[in-house]
Structures are given as C-alpha cells and as structure tokens.
Image (cartoon, helix red, strand yellow):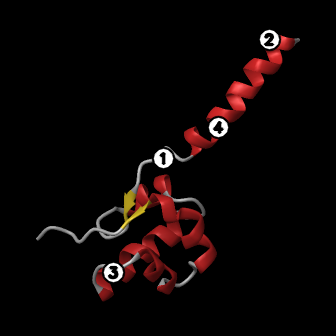
C-alpha cells in the first residue's frame, strides 16, 4: 500500500507538467486544424472564424486580440494563453 501511495503521488506531481507541455500555436500562421488541435475550447467553426478574421483584418498583434473574433471570449483566451504564440508571418 505504501508503494502505491508513492507511485500515485509521483503521478500526480507529473500531471501538471504533462498538461502544460502542449506545443504552442502561432495564431497568425496556424491553419484551422492546428488551431483545433492546439487550443482548448476551439472547435472547427471557431478555428475557421479565426482564420477568416485573420484574412480580413491582418495578423493579430497580441493574444488578447483573439477575443475580437466572434464566438471567442476572454475566458477562452485566458485558458489558452500559455499555448498561444503571436509571431508575425514571414512574407
């Protein structure tokens, strides 16, 4: 039983690192599938809305600008902040 508790404790300590190890997504260059795969709460429709917004308005300047996309709120931005990259696309 003591060994099981030690193993369980070790696993619980590892979980936050495993969850935060998701690769970052550049919201200025990612295609819709990459947005779906890399961001929490972003499904196919919201991902397409991000891509369309970007095409119509140009690249995002900062992560918080993602909240300007219809259907995406500040809570979604905050949940994903650690995984959002905002790098300008190369021309």
**Circles 1 and 4: CB atoms closer than 8 Å:** no
Q: Is residue 27 above or below residue 38?
A: below
> Residue at 29% across / 65% down in the picture?
29
Q: CA distance from mark 1 to mark 3?
A: 22 Å
Neighbourhood count class around disc 3 (C-alpha, 10 Å): few under 14, some 14–19, many 20 upward: few
Earlier-in-chain disc, 3 versus 4? 4
**Circles 3 and 4: CB atoms closer than 8 Å:** no
Q: Provide the residue designation for mark 4.
A: 15
* Percent x, y of residue 44: 51, 64
> Residue at 47% across / 79% down in the picture?
64
Foreground mark, 4 or 2, reads 2
* Percent x, y of residue 11: 69, 28
Q: Provide the residue designation for mark 1.
A: 22
Is residue 86 shown left or right of residue 89?
right
| Closer to us: 46 or 18 | 18
The disc label shown at residue 3, or none: 2
> Residue at 44% across / 71% down in the picture?
48
């Amino acid at each position: 039983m003591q060994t099981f508790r030690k193993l369980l404790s070790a696993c619980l300590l590892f979980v936050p690192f495993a969850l935060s190890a998701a690769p970052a997504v550049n919201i200025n260059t990612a295609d819709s599938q990459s947005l779906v795969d890399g961001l929490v709460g972003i499904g196919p429709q919201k991902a397409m809305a991000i891509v369309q917004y970007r095409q119509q308005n140009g690249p995002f300047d900062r992560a918080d600008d993602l909240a300007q996309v219809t259907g995406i709120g500040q809570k979604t931005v905050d949940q994903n902040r650690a995984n959002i990259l905002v790098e300008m696309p190369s021309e």
